[in-house]
Amino acid sequence: MRTFFKSLRSFSLKDIEEPDDVIERTPIPGLHWIRTYGLKSTEHSRIVLPSQGQGNFSVVFHADDFSESSHGGYEFYGLHLGQSDVLTFLATDARTMTGHFVDCRKDSPTLHTACALSFSGDPDKALVIDRGVAHIFDNLIGMVTLNQMRLYVDFANPDFNPATDVINVARDTPLDRFPAISVNRYKAPAWLCRIAVKAQRLQLRSGMANPNHPFKFKVGKKTLTLTRVRGFKDAVR
């Protein structure tokens, strides 16, 4: 313990705040790759350490039945208003994945700018997707994604629904038909993030919450939410 506190003296305040180490930028501000930190257990294996942020994370496993399409990915873009995704893609094969992105932030100078990124699994970097950037990925079957997301709150954002912070846009939607939304402005404190995760866990345990991932769409000024009870194809019929 004495050695630990002694080592802290060599760190500056900037080091303790841990700004992201950005290693590659894109045409959309807020969409970029950052360095991750991990311990090598073999040349290619890692124990991935928590990212700087609030300590929240989720792990997504894309099983063989994840997609029935030739692209092996999603059919809908996902768009968060109160969450920035920090994604590490973990794949043991040499596959190439592709992500497609559209800026949907109402006041962004790059509103409705689109770009695509091709990449392989790499435990040493993470893709940061800021709030308001719609995203969709291809060739995900059999791949694991670690998301060390960062949550944001805002009590004056009429577009935000804390119960379902995702808006979905169909894959073949023209760029000019993508939404233009306001994103949450304030980073949520860590204690609020922990409460949110605990509440979700308790709801799932008690059966109060549906364990299936919801899909939410904006149609004009109305919002439509679909829950995958019998599978998404059944739900939208």
Image (cartoon, rainbow, N blue to C red):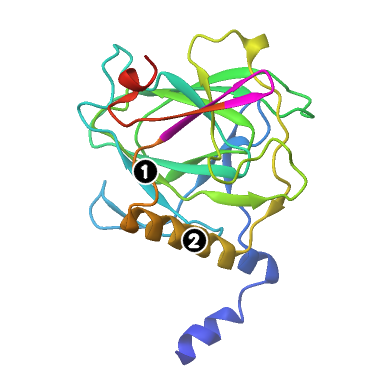
Badge 2 marks a residue whose secondary structure is loop
Left or right for 78, reference 152: left
Asked if residue 114 is positioned above or below residue 49 in the image, the reply reads: above
Left or right for 233, reference 127: left
Which circle, 1 or 2, is nearer the viewer? 1
Report the residue at 74% width, 41% height from top: 157
- Specify the quadrant of the image occupied by residue 27: top right
Report the residue at 34% width, 23% height from top: 232
- Which class describes the residues within 10 Å of circle 2: few (<14), some (14-19), or many (20+)? few
Residue type, label 1: Asn
Asked if residue 73 is positioned above or below residue 183 in the image, the reply reads: above
86, 83: nearer the viewer:
83
Whether residue 69 is in magenta: the answer is no
Residue type, label 2: Gly
Give the quarter of the figure containing the C terminus: top left
| Stretch in magenta | 214-223
Q: Which residue is mark 1?
A: 210
- Which class describes the residues within 10 Å of circle 1: few (<14), some (14-19), or many (20+)? few
128, 43: nearer the viewer:
128
**C-alpha span from label 1 to label 2:** 25 Å
Q: Which residue is mark 2?
A: 55
